[in-house]
Amino acid sequence: MKASQTFAGILFLLGAAIPTTQAESTLALGQIPPQASQCVSKHLGTSKLQSIVRDEEKEDVFNIVMTTAEGKSRTFSVDDTGQIVLEEIDQESAPAAVQKTIVSQAGDGKVTKIEKSNEDGELEYHVTVARGSGTMSGFTVEPDGRLSSVEVELTETSGPVRKTIESQLGSRKLESIEKVFDGATFEYEVEARGANGHLEKFIVGANGKLESVSASLQELSAPAQKTVKEHIGAGKIHEIHKIMPATPKGNALEVYGTKNGKPFNFRVGPAGMFQGQLN
């Protein structure tokens, strides 16, 4: 299991494909961290800045909308260290292997957006397609052309998977389901929004078993919180997964973050003890 960079994880977690109508929260270039500001200025070039909005899920990410010299609206996201983590690109700018998969996977649909994601050093391409039925769908492609995830409907999952998803949802609103491939196996990453507006995630295996649920640092036991804080140090936590099922001592955890500018992922045992880094 790894921290996801799926289509839904990017397009929904980062504010549903970069918002453009939140005027009340639009920032000036001088209101964001210096490194981020310098990155935005450099990336704009001759394009015109339209808006800067702090991401609703990731406070260290800023979503940018610009208009190119040709009059096209383009979007990108930059973090507070000045790194571009998400960028809208033309299909021709993607590697040949990625373009081939896009054409094959899109079929008769129309590709409406391609976004190059480079978060935590993991490069992926997120593609949005308009179907003839008037619906939108998405998928994610690795740099070598491998299909890494596909957005699916609840009705497209098996009976056991659907039962687990519906049970885990409760009163929360289903936002997206991603079928994520890992070699010959796959799992479903589900995002749901609670009554408080918070986006939560859980993972269901192909057999219908609940594999993990997302958690915040504050939800963890005191020993687990201490271990996570000690090892992440001045780094940043991106995701915490509570591994299912729980043991008599509690849940094991997988923590995904960055430290010293590099991915830093590790496991914490049910009793709160550090169990080493993840591959």
Image: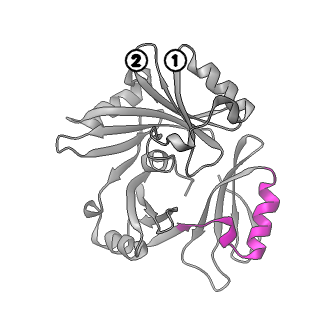
**How many numbered markers are drawn?**
2
**Does 4 sit left or right of 192 as displayed?**
right
Q: Main secondary structure of the magenta part?
A: helix
Residue 223 is a magenta residue: yes
Q: Amino acid at mark 2?
A: Gly
The numbered mark, 1 or 2, whose residue comes first in the sequence reads 1
Nearer to us in this view, 197 or 104: 197
Residue 89 in view in this figure: no
**Mark 1 packing: few (<14 Cα in 10 Å), some, or many (20+)?**
some
**Does 215 sit left or right of 184 as displayed?**
right
Q: CA distance from mark 1 to mark 2?
A: 9 Å
Q: Which residue occupies 65% across, 52% down?
A: 279
Q: Which residue occupies 62% across, 82% down?
A: 247
Q: Quadrant of residue 39?
A: top right
Q: Tell me the number on the disc at residue 15.
A: none
Residue 68 picture location, percent across and down: 46, 18
What residue is pinned by disc 2? 71
- Most extreme residue toward the bottom is 248
